[in-house]
Amino acid sequence: MKILGLILAGGHSSRMGRDKAGLEFAGKSLIQNQIETFKNRGFPIAISSNTYSLDAFEPIPVLEDPAEIRYGGPLAGVYAGINYAFANNYDFVLTMPVDCPIIPEEFFVRITSDIDKNTTLRMASTPSGLQPTFALWPTNLRSDLFEFLKGAENKSIRSFAFAHNVSIVRFDNIYSEGAFFNVNTPEDYQYLQDKFGIKNETKA
């Protein structure tokens, strides 16, 4: 089974007030951190973004939301990834957001274990709740997802997932400090710096 790693970096970073993907973590930008996270585990990579130029990370493809579903939120980015993966003969798309730099190895092992052609959508859950952007998407959801994005009023990942036989993969005993922590605001970024000794500045 072929899996494409997809970094969701299409948000406007409105709460942060600046591009989150360019924030530094341990000497690397958040987006470079996620690229290396996938690369170190052998996953081919694509990036979902409406703000980066298409050649910004060559040879890694940057995928824009299709015009028909532009502004459909993270789910539109997922569709862009699935559409690309389907066209390139991948069976699954493994998604993770650009703004969550600490991801335990257990996530990659368990979310992709024992997959076959009948495997349905899988989504991570932690003690703090569902993690919708950490998910394994079968590419055979492509048509359903496109129609959902065109017609649904609520275009959230959760809404689609629970209408499509999602399997929840629980990570109730995560021992990695900061695992699945999202950086959404300047306060979150400061917490990441203070808690984990990250003292880097934002890239200019």
Image (cartoon, grey):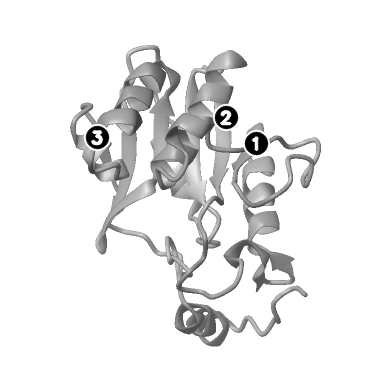
Residue identified by numbered label 2: 4
Identity of the residue drawn at 52% across and 60% down:
12
Using residue 20 as the reference point, say whether residue 141 is left or right of it: left
Report, in whole angstroms, how far the alpha carbon at label 2 lies from the one at label 1. 6 Å
Residue identified by numbered label 3: 152
Identity of the residue drawn at 68% across and 44% down:
40
Identity of the residue drawn at 24% across and 61% down:
127
Residue 56 at what x, y percent from top left?
A: 78, 47
Specify the amino acid type for callout 3.
Answer: Ala
Is residue 172 or residue 69 the one in the foreground?
Answer: 69
Which of labels 3 and 1 is toward the front?
Answer: 3
**In contact (CB < 8 Å): disc 3 and disc 2:** no
Disc tally is 3
Report, in whole angstroms, how far the alpha carbon at label 3 lies from the one at label 2. 26 Å
Q: Circle 3 sits in a helix, a strand or a loop, which is it?
A: loop
Is residue 149 or residue 57 the one in the foreground?
Answer: 149
